[in-house]
Image (cartoon, rainbow, N blue to C red):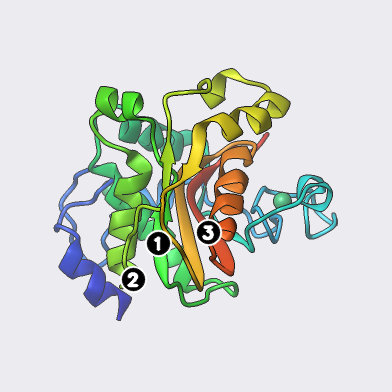
């Protein structure tokens, strides 16, 4: 069923390598075989890969207040997946469809799958969106919303204040997000799926989840293309 839906929305080219697709899967077999997938032994909340025989929830998720239920993540940030994520941010918005397909596949086959009332995304600052021309998280969210057949709604905004998260330490990131992200003047209810492209410390995703809960959503789930993990 999902393949019929996917064939309708995806062009007959692989969204990762642009090679022509020969069978009905919307990402080519070469790319599917070449991607670094999340290992099974991952945190049951944030999906960070865990040591063997460790607690099923990572130390970070045990020690912090976490505002989302579970994070669906198909890929580790390395190799081909890392290259594609960098391309997605630097002038190749086409790759968003590939990540949306992998996310839909991950979500629909997950034991944590639940029905979502809407999909939303981590916003970009007006300055960032002007410079790049698009928000890659929004592009993934729109593609994914079509695949899951739920509406994509912009719920949050980012100001030009605060610093770029990637220039900061983990502690600084937690402070910085409070200056960057704000709710739009909207109310939510039910279950929302929040999309971002890359999960690093989780400060942005957790703070945006907190804002969505404050806006009235009962449950927040994350769908993130890639997670950074130490080798
Ligand atoms: Zn391919
Ligand atoms: Zn965790």
Say which of marks 3 and 1 sits in front.
3
Whether pointer 2 and pointer 3 mark residues with C-beta atoms closer than 8 Å, the reply is no
Mark 2 → mark 3, Cα distance in angstroms = 19 Å
Mark 2, residue position: 150
Residue 82 coordinates in the image, percent (x, y):
45, 34
User: Quick one: SS at disc 3?
Assistant: loop
Quadrant in the picture for the C terminus: top right
Q: Which mark is residue 215?
A: 3
Q: Nearer the viewer, residue 130 or 98?
A: 130
Say which label, 1 or 2, has the lower sequence index. 1
* 133 lies above or below 49: above
Say which label, 2 or 3, has the lower sequence index. 2
Instruction: Residue lying at the far front in this picture: please name it.
Output: 185
* 190 lies above or below 55: below
Q: Nearer the viewer, residue 215 or 108?
A: 215
Whether pointer 1 and pointer 2 mark residues with C-beta atoms closer than 8 Å, the reply is yes
Mark 1 → mark 2, Cα distance in angstroms = 7 Å
* Residue 58 appears in the picture as rendered: yes
User: Quick one: SS at disc 1?
Assistant: strand
Residue 186 coordinates in the image, percent (x, y):
41, 57
Whether pointer 3 and pointer 1 mark residues with C-beta atoms closer than 8 Å, the reply is no
Residue 114 coordinates in the image, percent (x, y):
52, 76
Estimate how packed mark 1 is, as few (under 14), some (14 to 19) or many (20 or more) residues with alpha carbons within 10 Å.
Answer: many
* 109 lies above or below 197: below
């Amino acid at each position: 069923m999902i393949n019929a839906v996917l064939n309708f929305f995806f062009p007959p080219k692989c969204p990762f390598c642009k090679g022509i697709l020969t069978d009905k899967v919307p990402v080519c077999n070469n790319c599917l075989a070449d991607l670094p997938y999340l290992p099974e032994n991952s945190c049951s909340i944030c999906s960070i890969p865990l040591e063997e025989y460790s607690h099923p929830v990572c130390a970070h998720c045990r020690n912090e207040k976490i505002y989302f239920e579970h994070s669906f993540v198909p890929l580790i940030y390395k190799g081909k997946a890392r290259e594609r994520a960098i391309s997605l941010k630097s002038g190749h918005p086409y790759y968003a469809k590939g990540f949306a397909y992998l996310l839909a596949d991950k979500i629909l086959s997950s034991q944590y799958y639940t029905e979502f009332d809407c999909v939303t995304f981590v916003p970009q600052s007006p300055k960032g969106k002007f410079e790049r021309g698009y928000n890659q998280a929004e592009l993934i969210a729109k593609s994914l919303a079509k695949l899951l057949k739920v509406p994509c709604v912009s719920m949050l905004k980012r100001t030009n204040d605060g610093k770029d998260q990637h220039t900061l330490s983990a502690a600084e990131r937690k402070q910085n997000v409070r200056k960057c992200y704000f709710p739009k003047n909207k109310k939510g209810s039910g279950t929302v799926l929040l999309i971002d492209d890359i999960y690093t410390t989780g400060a942005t995703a957790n703070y945006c989840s907190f804002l969505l809960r404050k806006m009235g959503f009962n449950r927040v789930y994350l769908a993130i293309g890639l997670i950074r993990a130490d080798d």
